Amino acid sequence: MAAGHLYVTRDLGPEPMELLRNSGWKLVVHPDRDLPPARAALLDGVRGAAGIITLLTEAMDAELFDCAGPKLQVVSAVSVGTDNIDIEAASRRGITVTNTPDVLTDATADLAMGLLLALNRRIVEADAFLRRGEAWSWGPRLFLGRDLAEEVLGIVGYGRIGEALAKRARAFGMRVVAAGSGSAQNGGVERMPLDQLLATADVLSLHAPLTEQTRHLLGAQQIASMKPDAVIINTARGPLIDENALVEALKAKRIRGAGLDVFEHEPKIHPDLLELDNVVVTPHIGSAGEQTRTRMALLAVKNALAVLNGQDPAHPVNGHQKHCFA
Ligand code: DGY
């Protein structure tokens, strides 16, 4: 049986692509640099593949694994989140799934801090105000925001990124509390149950992975239990928040604002979010530092090649499993 090819769902940039080209594996790369392959093209591209390097925009599910067939040994995600991959279905077929933790921690925490600053100091609103050309003069009440050093940051999901955000927020003088599981050291961060955190935080930032347990972690009831002048930051996964409930709360000013890098039905965005002054939105760019993205892609390529060459990958998600059909 021929070895099979490596299917890559997007051009990953010069350095990672060169590593792939020099790997000796036959490559099939989805030709569009900006948009993911349509499902039919994806199923076609993976047919007979030994490995797939995927972005978070492609669903890697049982149908796709069956379509790829028995040569498939590895699905390597260019992301830390693997909620687009059916891990159980992969494990049942002996397919190793890998991801890219650590290398994007600082970049993602930077963006969360940026959204926090933008909301608390109303930077985007103030920028839009000036661009409208409205008359203005310095005034004691012009664009009053919130003083960071007097605010409590509540982190939900205290892993690597939550910990990196805590470090940044503490440097700004914020008190930091955290809820939920996570591997991070406490480092001066007070742990508390989620319901207590919701009632305590002035800024709530989500850093939990998306699972069936965390889907709609923030719904109408949880949002209602927050302080009326609290803001929500989400740089993790959109479905952690019930977006309809969030929109209702923002419109009714039951919370002060939201900074969203991710959306429940990405890439679609609830249209009302785009109409609200108290919302800052970015298009899922948490890890979009130039160096970070290269590190992520290189790590994903190395993870894939390790499995294909019979070695242990640096970051297996489901353990390194020998391919049962090999
Ligand atoms: C991830 O890695 O899961 C991010 O959402 C994209 O960098």
Image (cartoon, grey):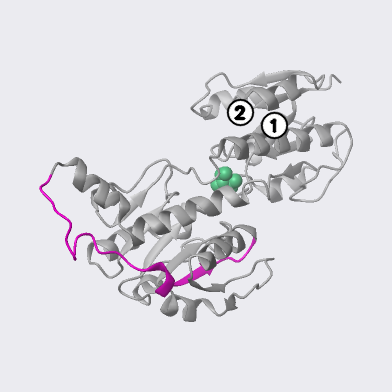
Q: Which mark is residue 52?
A: 1
Dot 1: what SS? strand
Locate residue 239 relative to residue 14 in the image: left or right. left
Asked whether the viewer can see residue 62, the reply is: yes
Circle 2 Cα neighbour tier, 10 Å, few/some/many (<14 / 14–19 / ≥20)? many
* Residue holding disc 2: 9
What's the distance in space between the residues labelled 2 and 1, CA to CA?
Answer: 8 Å
Numbered range of the magenta stretch? 134-159
How far across and how far down the image is residue 319, in percent?
81, 50
Looking at the rendered image, the quarter that the N terminus falls into is top right
* Most foreground residue, 173 or 116: 173
Residue at the spot x=59%, y=74% of the render?
189
> Is residue 146 a member of the stretch shown in magenta?
yes
The earlier-in-sequence mark between 2 and 1 is: 2
User: Residue 7: x, y in percent?
Assistant: 68, 25
Question: Is residue 143 covered in magenta?
Answer: yes
Left or right of 12, for residue 5: right
Which residue is the extreme one toward the left? Answer: 135
Magenta residues, dominant SS class: loop
**For disc 1, does the CB lie below 8 Å from ligand 1?**
no
Query: CB under 8 Å between callouts 2 and 1?
Result: yes
User: Measuring 79% from the left and 29% from the top, which residue is drawn there?
Assistant: 71
Q: Is residue 275 left or right of residue 292?
A: left
